[in-house]
Image: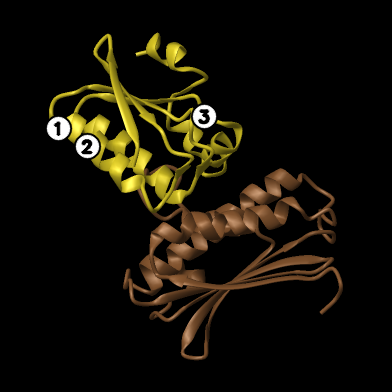
Chain colours: A brown, B yellow
């Protein structure tokens, strides 16, 4: 591990009451990132948001609201990148099949993945070890 | 969820007294708006002064309220959005859908 690297590995029950805890951890870490050239408060808010959206996706859709399952969140920050992985044990879905919101027809749902894609530099969702992983990265230096 | 309601000039104001409006609590707001429209309230103002953080579920609850207002021939407007909350409306283009006012008082003059 590099001396500036930060790694957080946490598992919480598959319940929405833990959204604020995980979101806040991500936000607090991002606020301390003096290696980031841009607006750190904005980055922190966005990290809170994408963590929240990714966890909701895991809790409600992938893990089908089963409170006995767990959501596993991994955050790794190097000098260059901030990487977030959210693991679930559910059926999974094809991230590329989710259309962007139809701005002319008002729907209650369907903005979560769109928000993640808008705020992060790379987003992928794939099967891993019998479950699934949503991985997203944000460049801290390379594309600021 | 901590919601405070107040009625002024036949406008029902819902003050969302939470720092986060997210997938954990937004169904309570959605239910409250639905209940108010069903008992015959026509005009609802949702005041977000205390809300620092909103996610797609929070936005979805407000969209649901907006659609409910239309189906009950009523209206739903928003006031006092913090800058980062407002930026989420812009990111999802919902600022084109809702009437958003800087303060409760300003919103009340525009029903």
Is B8 situated above or below B52? Answer: above
In the depicted structure, whether residue A103 falls above or below residue A89: above
- Name of the residue lying farthest toward the left: B39
Rendering quarter of residue B11:
top left
Chain of residue at mark 2? B
Q: Is residue A101 left or right of residue A134?
A: left
* Residue A59 placement (x, y as % from top left): 40, 68
Query: Label 1: how many residues lie within 10 Å, few (<14), some (14-19) or many (20+)?
Result: few
Q: CA distance from mark 1 to mark 2?
A: 6 Å
Question: Which of the marked residues, 1 or 3, is nearer the chain's N terminus?
Answer: 1
Q: Label 3 belongs to which residue?
A: B81
- Quarter of the image with the C terminus of chain B in it: top left
For label 3, the SS is: loop
Q: Determine the residue positioned at 36% across, 46% down.
A: B26
Q: Residues within 10 Å of mark 3 (few under 14, many from 20)?
A: many
Real-space Cα separation, disc 3 to disc 2, in angstroms? 22 Å
The reply to whether the C-beta atoms of the residues labelled 3 and 2 are less than 8 Å apart is no
Query: Taking A15 as reference, is B109 above or below it?
Result: above
List the residue tagged with mark 2. Answer: B34
Residue A107 appears in the figure = no
Asked if badge 1 and badge 3 are on a common chain, one would say yes
The answer to whether the residue labelled 1 contacts the one labelled 2, judged by CB atoms less than 8 Å apart, is yes
Q: Percent position (x, y) of residue A142? A: 84, 61
- In three-dimensional space, the C-alpha distance between marks 1 and 3, rounded to whole angstroms, equals 26 Å
Residue A106 coordinates in the image, percent (x, y): 37, 43
User: If you read the primary sequence from the N terminus, does the residue marked by circle 3 or circle 2 appear first?
Assistant: 2
Count the marks: how many?
3
Quadrant of the image occupied by residue A22: bottom right
């Amino acid at each position: 591990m590099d001396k500036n690297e930060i790694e957080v590995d946490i598992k919480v029950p598959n319940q929405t009451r833990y959204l604020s805890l995980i979101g806040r951890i991500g936000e607090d870490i991002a606020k301390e990132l003096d290696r980031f050239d841009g607006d750190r408060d904005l980055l922190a808010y966005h990290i809170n948001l994408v963590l929240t959206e990714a966890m909701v996706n895991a809790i409600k859709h992938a893990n089908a609201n089963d409170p006995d399952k767990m959501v596993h969140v991994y955050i790794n920050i190097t000098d260059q990148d901030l990487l977030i992985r959210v693991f679930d044990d559910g059926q999974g879905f094809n991230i590329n099949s989710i259309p962007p919101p139809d701005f002319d027809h008002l729907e209650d749902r369907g903005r979560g993945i769109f928000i993640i894609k808008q705020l992060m530099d790379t987003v992928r969702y794939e099967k891993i070890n019998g479950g699934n992983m949503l991985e997203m990265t944000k460049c801290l230096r390379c594309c600021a | 969820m901590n919601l405070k309601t107040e009625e002024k000039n036949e406008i029902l104001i819902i003050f969302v007294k939470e720092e986060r409006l997210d997938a954990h609590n937004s169904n309570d707001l959605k239910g409250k708006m639905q209940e108010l429209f069903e008992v015959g309230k026509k005009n609802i103002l949702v005041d977000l002064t205390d809300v620092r953080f909103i996610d797609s579920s929070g936005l979805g609850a407000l969209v649901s309220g907006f659609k409910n207002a239309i189906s009950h021939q009523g209206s739903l407007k928003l006031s006092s959005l913090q800058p980062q909350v407002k930026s989420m409306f812009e990111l999802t283009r919902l600022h084109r859908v809702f009437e958003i006012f800087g303060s409760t008082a300003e919103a009340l003059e525009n029903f």
